[in-house]
Amino acid sequence: MQNSRQEHLFKILVIGDLGVGKTSIIQRYVDQSFSTNYRATIGVDFALKVLNWDSDTVRLQLWDIAGQERFGNMTRVYYREAVGAFIVFDITRPTTFEAVKRWKEDLDSKLTLSNGKSVAIVLLANKCDLNRDELKNNGIKVDQFCKDNGFVGWFETSAKENTNIDRAANCLVKYIIASENDILKSVVPDSISLQLNSRRNSNCSACLNS
Ligand SMILES: Nc1nc2c(ncn2[C@@H]2O[C@H](COP(=O)(O)OP(=O)(O)OP(=O)(O)O)[C@@H](O)[C@H]2O)c(=O)[nH]1
Ligand SMILES: [Mg+2]
């Protein structure tokens, strides 16, 4: 029998305000490294992460977009053909949480999938190593916010301590693959389900649609 290993290539955006930790999260995820030095990203940077996903291969092309780009006019170009996004904020700076909505509006106004839906977005509450109670202290109700604003899920993350970054990425990939299957199913209703959205990440408690 032929090997039916499939390859998926997903363009994923990583956006959010200046200094929230986008580059650090990507470096942790891709290189398993962390630096306390802050060097602002200029424009956009790229990284690739390859995942074994059941019997398939998933390549995540990560677009690390500089925080200052929200005020520029290049985001339309950067967003093109993305199928998912992380929006990141810094739990110690509430203004970066307020900016999440504006990033999402920017994204939704400039990018829709071929099926007319908006791209899957996972929210990352980063720097959770600094203060576990910070969200509560600042009165930030992330659960409700994500439900109201159509996020796929959210995670408290730390690039420094490597907390929840793999889980957040798995949540996003799982959602994207499941939507791909939905599209396939609606086109070929009698095809055999590949079960790509099997229960492998069922412990993804912060993932609203799991
Ligand atoms: N304590 C802590 N510091 C972090 C964490 N993630 C990032 N930082 C620090 O926050 C600063 C900014 O991180 P970057 O990853 O450069 O932020 P960015 O979002 O890419 O910023 P721009 O490129 O300017 O948009 C750096 O000094 C990092 O070391 C984290 O999880 N915990
Ligand atoms: Mg950066």
Image (cartoon, grey):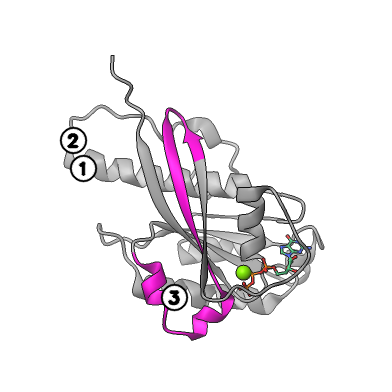
For the residue marked with disc 3, what is the amino acid? Glu
Is 58 positioned to the left or the right of 193 in the image? right
User: Label 3 crowding class (10 Å Cα cut-off): few <14, some 14-19, many 20+?
Assistant: few
**Mark 1 highlights which residue?**
186
**Is residue 75 covered in magenta?**
yes
Q: What kind of residue is marked 2?
A: Pro
Q: Which residue is mark 3?
A: 105
Asked whether, in this view, residue 158 is left or right of residue 11, the answer is right
Mark 1 residue type? Ser
Task: Using a 10 Å C-alpha cutoff, classify the residue at mark 2 as few (fewer than 14 neighbours), some (14 to 19) or many (20 or more).
Answer: few
The image shows a total of numbered marks equal to 3
Q: CA distance from mark 1 to mark 3?
A: 29 Å
Residue picked out by circle 2: 189
What residue range appears in magenta? Answer: 51-80
Quarter of the image where one finds residue 188: top left
- Cα gap from disc 2 to disc 3, whole angstroms: 34 Å
Residue 18 is at least partly visible in this image: yes
Quadrant location of the N terminus?
top left
Instruction: State the separation of the CA atoms marked 2 and 1.
Output: 5 Å
Q: Earlier in the sequence, mark 2 or mark 3?
A: 3
Residues at discs 2 and 1 in contact (Cβ within 8 Å): yes
Q: Is residue 136 above or below residue 52?
A: below
